Image (cartoon, rainbow, N blue to C red):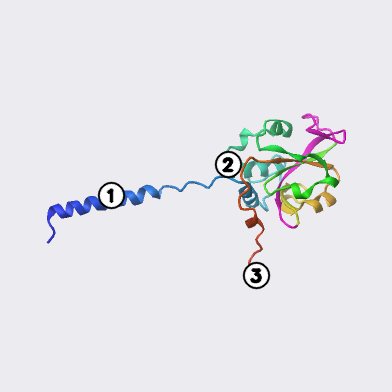
Amino acid sequence: MRSRRDLLTASAHLAGSVLVLLLPGTAAAAPPPDRASLVTAARTYLGRPFSWGGRDRELDCLGLIFLSWQDVTGTSWKRISVYPTKMVAREQLGAPVPGLDGVRSAAIPWDQLEPGDFLLFLGSAENPAEPALTTVDGTPMWVWHTGLYSGGPERRFVVGDHFAGQVVETSLPRYLRQEGSGYEGLFVVRPALPSGDIDALHVPPPADATR
């Protein structure tokens, strides 16, 4: 028969074990943010209805960017300017990509785009609310649309789209051909985050998942 002292010792050891088990039971640290995670976050909003100025149950193109950024980085979207010229100047979402910081749609160097890049669609129509973001071939350009590049063989991007009436993921070259008559160029901002698992973004679904 075990003595009282043995029982107390065993209880103390058990209590210590419980503490050891409980302490690591706190929420595990979230993985560091990366650009692949931005794409994954944006895809969670696919199908959400479009609404001008939408930032919640309905989204516009900028709302999708804001919420994806907030989901991944934990930074409130309200800390980001709604004016692209200020957002770019302050590098709130990253830095302009040399060679993609104002380029005609017909001359986009596709191999320089990376998943997780923020796309600013340029047009020469003046936006009286803010100055031109850049000039392309001597022509001042304003931002009229935004999206998040997801890449892959079709060079896709995720966008809160006023044409589709919802958040969609579609081919960027095809979009520019079919819907981009007013979008004369692109300006690309790349977040200062590691690329992450880019390959996992384009793994084809299992065969039975498509039936």
Dot placed on the residue nearer the N-terminal end, 1 or 3? 1
Which residue carries the number 1 mark? Answer: 16
Q: Earlier in the sequence, mark 2 or mark 3?
A: 2
Location of residue 95 (image quadrant): top right
Q: Secondary structure at mark 2?
A: helix
Quarter of the image with the N terminus in it: bottom left
Report which residue position mark 2 lands on: 73
Q: Residue 88 is drawn in which quadrant? A: top right
Which residue was labeled with disc 3?
A: 207
Q: Position of residue 96 (x, y in %)?
A: 72, 37
Nearest to the observer: residue 134 or residue 193 = 193
Mark 2–mark 3 distance (CA, rounded to whole Å): 34 Å
Contact check, label 1 and label 2, Cβ < 8 Å: no
User: Residue type at mark 3?
Assistant: Ala
The correct choice, above or below, for 6 with respect to 51 in the image is: below
Q: Secondary structure at mark 3?
A: helix
Residue at left offset 60%, top offset 46%: 34
Q: CA distance from mark 1 to mark 2?
A: 36 Å
Q: Amino acid at mark 1?
A: Gly
- The residue at the point 46 percent across, 48 percent down is 28
Q: Which residues are magenta?
A: 125-153
- The residue positioned 80% from the left and 35% from the top of the image is 142
